[in-house]
Amino acid sequence: MPDSDVAALDGEVSGATVDDVRIVFTPSGKRGDFPEGTTVLEAARALGVDLDSVCGGRGICGRCQCVQSVGEFPKFGLKSRQENLTEFNDVETRYKTKRGMKDDRRLGCQSRLKGDAVIDIPAESQVHKQVVRKRAEVRDIEIDPAVRLFYIEVAEPDMHHPSGDLERVVSALGDQWGITGLERADLPVLQGLQKALRDGEWKVTVAVRWDNKIVHIWPGFHDRSFGAAVDIGSTTMSVHLTNLQTGEVVSSVGAMNPQIRFGEDLMSRVSYVMMNPGGDAELTTTVRETLGYLLTQASLEAEIDVNDILELVLVGNPIMHHLMLGVDPTELGWAPFALTTNQPVRVRARELGLEGKTNPGARAYFLPCVAGHVGADAAAVVLSEGPQYRDEMTLVVDVGTNAEIVYGNKERLLACSSPTGPALEGAQISSGQRAAPGAIERVRIDRETLEPRFRVIGSDVWSDDEAFAESVRKSGVSGICGSGIIEVMAELFLAGVITADGIIDGGLAARSDRIVADGRTFAYILHRGEPEIRVTQADVRAIQLAKAALYAGAQLLVDKIGKAPERVVLAGAFGSHIDTKYAMVLGLIPDCPLDKVASVGNAAGTGARIALLNVKARDEVRETIARIEKIETAVEPRFQEHFVDAMAIPNKTAPFPNLQKEVALPEPKFAEAAASQSGAEGGRRRRRRR
Amino acid sequence: MPDSDVAALDGEVSGATVDDVRIVFTPSGKRGDFPEGTTVLEAARALGVDLDSVCGGRGICGRCQCVQSVGEFPKFGLKSRQENLTEFNDVETRYKTKRGMKDDRRLGCQSRLKGDAVIDIPAESQVHKQVVRKRAEVRDIEIDPAVRLFYIEVAEPDMHHPSGDLERVVSALGDQWGITGLERADLPVLQGLQKALRDGEWKVTVAVRWDNKIVHIWPGFHDRSFGAAVDIGSTTMSVHLTNLQTGEVVSSVGAMNPQIRFGEDLMSRVSYVMMNPGGDAELTTTVRETLGYLLTQASLEAEIDVNDILELVLVGNPIMHHLMLGVDPTELGWAPFALTTNQPVRVRARELGLEGKTNPGARAYFLPCVAGHVGADAAAVVLSEGPQYRDEMTLVVDVGTNAEIVYGNKERLLACSSPTGPALEGAQISSGQRAAPGAIERVRIDRETLEPRFRVIGSDVWSDDEAFAESVRKSGVSGICGSGIIEVMAELFLAGVITADGIIDGGLAARSDRIVADGRTFAYILHRGEPEIRVTQADVRAIQLAKAALYAGAQLLVDKIGKAPERVVLAGAFGSHIDTKYAMVLGLIPDCPLDKVASVGNAAGTGARIALLNVKARDEVRETIARIEKIETAVEPRFQEHFVDAMAIPNKTAPFPNLQKEVALPEPKFAEAAASQSGAEGGRRRRRRR
């Protein structure tokens, strides 16, 4: 900060007199002159230094903790000494005893200036803290939630100057926090207001939304506020309960989407609605009840009161989005796939039947759907992965029962969805299961003996290790999860057991007793046990169909842009543990340098969490989505061609030069007469559009 | 309108070319030049002429009806001839056949200019129609409701340029009606949107609130919208269902407030809540259910669909206001009588448990309470009677179980409430009943013989007429209503049967067999029949207490201002049929020239209806109320003095010079030893504050 600015600030803020002392804040460098006795918090506010406070300087919340830097600071032209702040006072001692505080810390609201001081604001004392994300290539999240808490002391009523309790709360928020324009309170706030004020002896904490509505009042001091990032997948649903002040995820819970009993894929559920009057209400109730259950579970796990959940951000594909809102999804089942709205939707949580699962004043914010087949989950993935800020052509694939695909860079972005079905999540697979202890997640197959070795979730030991049996004693070996399916398929292909057109080669039964007849086709026995785990011809077909749909969607967007991907992000519940090399061996995604392919897990959930923690991100994603070009795969003839080619492993026509630098692909081997037939079959199934 | 303004308008609007023709609108005088072929509606819109339309110029709604004035108009400098408008077209013929239209009327959207024309806009074709009120001294109501209907034609979805159905509705409202800033729709609108658009074949009618929310969508053309003005009294509740476009009251229904079973007066109900945990919820449910019932009844009576009720305005005393909102009224039961809020409250009707009783998008607007004891009903009375616009000192008394009293003029306004109890409404009276057929409403007592004659509601014949028996054959004579009680009491006083201190004079039993012993006191037999109707000493006491409270409250305000009332308005369910002379004989109200005392019926209900029809009136009443000085009778020592004096008839100390010009009051006669005792009794009861 140049000195001229400082001078301007000084003049503006303190009208510097000779008796003033100087305070410099780090890391911001903001400084100013104030009369002796000014508190550090007051000085910070006057200078616009980002120092948090919920209790408004009453020594209760401990948010304004700061550290005095002691020594000579020639660049600031001053000496900062311990005795330049007033001594640790009773309020600070009480706070430290009751709630704990590091030894060098002071409460900014209690320590007053006696001389020049350099005050450091630790990251956790900033209002707009950053949540640092693990991956270097994505942006950190600035905490700026839609709802904040304010502790206030309210004037008592006076019969001779009658005014409403609410109006005195509003005055206190204005006087003590500078909040203006407040006018309305939710009905439940009105209903609880008088009791809260009297129980709190005219000291209350108020939750205020950024749109200036009061949504809750607690008696006394209250500093817990949480939000839920909700990802409603067709197959699985997840809730990440997040602290709205620190950004910390305090619990994550997931469940199968119980709508599965109405149809595994989206289109079967839409069909159910079309065939059964009232079916949409049934599906809505089902998904809402599950969300309520997950919120309760997440609260129990994190040991928080559901009443402290003030905000929800929801993402999901358009059909889940509509059903959660209670909108009949029928129109999404046929051309022109009209969305009810392509804008964000804000409702009260209780309008979603979440009474008692959140604070009565909680709001739910649905990120906008991109198009009739590209959901709010894609919007969330964009928010999390930020292809719109990059120069590199980035392909983001969010694998779910419907894959949402975004491609482009800061110049141009395209999006589509592709109906992969749930196979890649482990459903529709004979031994498939959710990623849970006991599920096979890693597989290697000896190229000569065709013998497998594998690892299961919950154990670090490979199955050919003598410690294996003991290590899985509890979980057993129960099935294959999404990433395991990718690996076993890819390894079987690399070992020559599966042909390029996806046939389990029965001719190899002679070489290995792992390959066995299974009706009119063959299967590969991955694990002999209880249960026996095998890969059947139907399993291979299911994965082929899924990966062909995924690839075809991605390739369609690559075609439109006319440039090959320079970076690929594989997201999705299944995506966090996937070995990207195997994904490319199978041809799930177009060729790309392998070190530029990342698997990032639930990016949609992360996007929801960003929108939860930062309101500005909501506008940002809305603007980005408005300029995304929406591609409808159902009417793109090239999709069919790409799909047919992509039924082959890794692909019938597309080369994989980057992949081949790293992996020795076998010579293409096609099972006679099967090639054309499987393609046609895929085309037929595709037209049913799941 | 001066010509210079017109020229400015011309220039602005038409950029007048030589081929333009001139149109002049009456009664506004607005004029302009337009190309031949311009429709009258287009010209009206361009010139800002107040010409209604719901269908946007499609010849469906018939709101833009106008009349061409034919002849020479020298002051406009033009000739207006029949053939200067295009001929009556098919759309007009269809409308006239289907829905009827006067012979000289044209549809403004269908008739096009061919030459100069003078077009008259009848009152009912104006958007901002006036509802003309019967009494000369009150302002008419300009219709400008919170919600309006707009018929639109919406673009169909296009898969290649995907956009949400809602966003295309918003575009249509912008393009076809110039409505901008629309962004949000209620969740039920989203839920019904897609079906409405498709059922209406992309033609729909949208209900838009003035705060730019879409609250409902109907397929096709829809032009019915209603509001309910709701008056929640402690004893009775009423609903006036009102057409939001014409201001017409289409039905009025009332019911007893079923909370009466929890206590006749307000304080007994508050006590019930204090003594019974959950009692507030019970009282809330009771009053909400009754409102739901009244809405249903009013809709049935008017033969309208409850789904066409889009708006409610509610008024009531603070306790009813709080209970309807679901706010525990306990704080209103003791000093300092703190209101939850003194601002208007806006909620959705369904938050009041009115699902299925109104449109799902209906809003409820609670007029603000003035103070802890002065309710939103007083606010409504102020809105209806407008003392704040007058020079004369005006006393407005709204009689209910609690009387709300407003006094002052445009310089200064004061308000208080006074706990009269329900006696003046006919409750707590031995033969009391609601105003209904069979109830005695007029009474005369012969000064000599002490024989009565009376009239009952539903009959024009006095009881001493030989046609009387036949005229009440159906109803019978069932009791006395509020206005009847006032009259019989006043007549008994004027006849000397009741003393100035309210004792039925047993000494007169010798003169008339109407006066009979009744336990330790006496009673007057008004009607010998089945049932026998008598006025008991307890009845007289009840009325005395009620009228003393009323008078004392009014006099307190008169004292504060220091000027006598120049005008008195008696309002209240009981007030519409009251003979103001008898009210003054009893000393309900301070002295005032009798021709300046009006009894106006349910002014609170009228005020609610004004707020329903005109949103600006809501701001107006809010501002007026903010500057009203609130007087708390409970802490005013003079209230007790006035109360004791007012126990006497008409009053122990106050003179009634104006009244005495019109009515010969008897010499004050006090029953020995009773005077001081009844005053003390009143004081004791007063302290209990009912």
Image (cartoon, coloured by chain):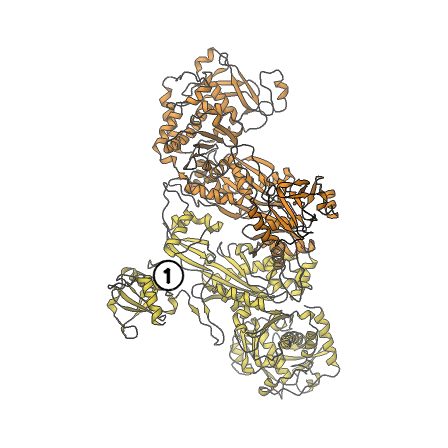
Chain colours: A orange, B yellow
- Which residue is located at x 36 percent, y 18 percent? A673
Three-letter code for the amino acid on which mark 1 is drawn: Ser
Can residue A156 be seen here?
Answer: yes
- Local packing at callout 1 (Cα closer than 10 Å; few below 14, some 14-19, many 20+) is many
- A532 or A187, which is in the foreground? A187
**Subunit ID for the residue under disc 1:** B
Give the percent coordinates (x, y) of residue B285.
Answer: 60, 57
Placement of the C terminus of chain B among the 4 image quadrants: bottom right
Give the percent coordinates (x, y) of residue A644.
Answer: 37, 26
Please tell me in which quadrant of the rendered image residue B601 appears: bottom right
- B330 or B166, which is in the foreground? B166
Specify whether A665 is left or right of A60.
left
B650 vs A492: above or below: below
A50 vs B650: above or below: above
Give the percent coordinates (x, y) of residue B604.
Answer: 55, 68
Give the percent coordinates (x, y) of residue A611.
Answer: 53, 42
- B215 or B79, which is in the foreground? B79
A573 vs A509: above or below: below
Specify whether B581 is left or right of B68.
right
- B224 or B407, which is in the foreground? B407
Q: Which residue lies furthest to the top in this view?
A: A510
Q: What element carries label 1?
A: loop
Placement of the N terminus of chain B among the 4 image quadrants: bottom left
Please tell me in which quadrant of the rendered image residue B449 appears: bottom right
Can residue B537 be seen here?
Answer: no
Judging by the rendered image, the residue that carries numbered circle 1 is B53
